Amino acid sequence: MRKNITKLLAGIACLCAFGLATPSFADAPAKAEEATTTVVAAPAVTPVPDAAPAATAPAPAAAAPAAAPVANKGDTSFMMISTLLVILMTIPGLALFYGGLVRSKNMLSVLMQVFMVFALVIVLWCIYGYSIAFTEKTAFFGGFDRLFLNGIWDPAKGTFAAAATFSKGVVIPEFVFVAFQGTFAAITCALIVGAFAERAKFAAVLAFVVLWFTFAYLPAAHMVWFWTGPDLITNAATSASEALKAGWIWQKGALDFAGGTVVHINAAVAGLVGAIMIGKRVGYGRESMAPHSLTMTMIGASLLWVGWFGFNAGSSLEAGDVAALAFVNTLLATAAATLSWVFGEWISKGKPSMLGGASGAVAGLVAITPAAGFVGPMGGLVIGLLAGVICLWGVNGLKRLIGADDSLDVFGVHGVGGILGALLTGVFAAPQLGGQGIFDYVTNKMSADPYSIGHQVWVQAQAVGTTIIWSAVVSLIAYKLVDIVIGLRVPEEEEREGLDITSHGEQAYHG
């Protein structure tokens, strides 16, 4: 009976995903100067010059259409390597980081959840997710032009479509962009499972991911990252008109280089809602629930750090100066956060720990993500130093205030770090503090308008608030639906025995 119910829910979720009608919202008015924020680009069409006007006398031959841009092999190779690095940071990176933090009886269940969520989301991304996130429709939800990745390969012409980058006339193969963004979607959904580890039903996790991916991740990605690219922007009028086609948060001018809102805050809120709704682990606060293998956690954290260079530097979409800036910021901010977390723990608890070092590194990676390509190295250094100590408070003081059993501190690290990084991006992106400021695609150089830190921080706060509310509402509804049909939590006796045996019939360790 339970298997039949599980199949029924999976069928309903798929039908919801395929039959979803996009909401009809009017685009919010956009400021021309805010339409130049450099975040992830959607495929853009290269403009073609108008034909010569007709004349009674024989007219000269019309000018030939401008040749379509050709992807640079160096940029393409860079993006493929970056995509592989993001896969590395998910499987095995995130899986081992999470696996080492749970008790040995639940090691395989966490590995299985991360592995299967990654695979599930990649399939959904290629079927409908990419189209909804990165095609034009409304300011909140894309359309179905790329359903099943249709239209990228044209068998009649024998050509492949290209995706715009952040430089006029520079493109990458659209299939590479699809793969790169697909790995972002997959790791975001996988992050959530750490919040309710050791007690959730495997079928419930998969069903929730289908619903949350469709109704929370895809709209967030569209709102924050979708635009039509720089090539159609030639003057103030085209800048304003193209901005109206972009996602709602993009139109506001929010800066999110690689996913502070879309990835970290989005996933952290979903995890926190899940931890509250599923309830605390049996014996929480009374029995020891120490990590069973900090060796595994250290390996996972190291793989996360390595893979994050693809995550952040790859979000530039080109192997150029901005990618180099994102690269050095990822290196520096993470090192700074590791130091500040460990020394903060050393001062407050009397001893530095390996777990603190690994957690500090992840906190720094999270916080620098939205800022990586916008702030200077010293801005990145400050963001990292603040992230270490503030996220240390997030997994201790804030966690006690909330009272939820967030098993692996998803909200304390990804939520707190993501919010901090998103807000500080507005501060340290300022040219007067060594940041990049705002790029003006009309003049094709940095904007001459004065950069207002106060205004940009307010815009960043709106993006953070929108993400929190959207993710919380969708998560609440999705968890409730799954609980009604499947049930979110395993029985107490199965939880005590461990999910490795009761859910998967396997053991991570023998003898």
Image (spheres, rainbow, N blue to C red):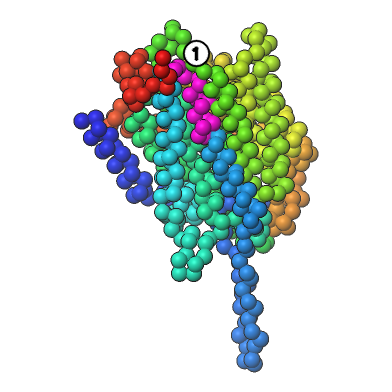
Quarter-of-image position of residue 81:
top right
Q: In which quadrant of the rendered image does the C terminus lie?
A: top left
In front of the other: 174 or 466: 174
Q: In which quadrant of the rendered image does the N terminus lie?
A: top left
Q: Considering the numbered disc 1 on the image, is that residue within a helix, a strand or a loop?
A: loop
Q: Is residue 489 visible?
A: no
Other residues around mark 1 within 10 Å, as few (<14) / some (14–19) / many (≥20): few
In front of the other: 335 or 425: 335
Expressed as whole percent of the image width and height from the top left, the position of residue 42 reads: 55, 53
- 447 in relation to 265, above or below: below
Q: Residue at coordinates 45% horizontally, 69% vertically from top-left?
A: 156
What is the magenta range? 90-104
Expressed as whole percent of the image width and height from the top left, the position of residue 100 reads: 50, 21
Residue 101 is one of the magenta-drawn residues: yes
> Which residue position is annotated with label 1?
290
Expressed as whole percent of the image width and height from the top left, the position of residue 236 reads: 67, 59
- 52 in relation to 104, above or below: below
